[in-house]
Amino acid sequence: MPSTPAWQRKAGQNPDGGLNATGRASLRAEGKDIKPPVSAKEAAASPAKAKRRVAFCKRMAGMKAKLTSATTANAVHRLRCIGRTSGPGQAYRPARASTGRGNR
């Protein structure tokens, strides 16, 4: 039996980024509360899941590109977070960074 939990090994990791069911199960065994990613179909069916998906997209929108790993970038792309809305009819756009040179 391996000495490390599955979520830390290749067996528990999804090749596209994140954890597979085995990895999530090993984290649950350690007492962590982790859920699978929310698909667009699930988000359309459940307001709670849609809220969770939008919250993830908002968190990822604040990440600096140079600090984001390739697996995180894949997750953002798979969940189609670019251009997601913050709520019904409201476009979510991160604030523009000011360079201090009098942007107009």
Image: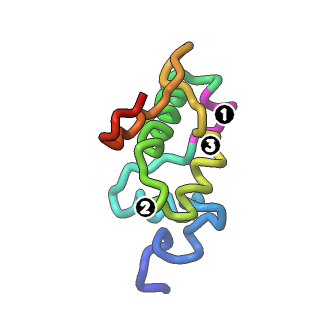
Answer above or below: position of 2 versus 83: below
| Quadrant of res 46 | top right
Residue 43 sits in which quadrant?
top right
- Residue at (49%, 27%) from the top-left corner? 92
Image disc number at residue 23: none
Q: Nearer the viewer, residue 3 or 79?
A: 79
Q: Type of residue at label 2?
A: Leu
Q: Secondary structure at mark 2?
A: helix
**Crowding near the residue tagged with mark 1, few <14, some 14–19, many ≥20 C-alpha atoms within 10 Å:** some
Viewer-nearest of discs 2 and 3: 2
**Front of the two marks 1 and 3:** 3
Q: Residues within 10 Å of mark 3 (few under 14, many from 20)?
A: some
- Residue in the foreground of this view, choosing between 34 and 44: 44
Residue occupied by mark 2: 67
x%, y% of residue 87? 50, 19
Q: Is 98 left, or right, of 57 in this rendering?
A: left
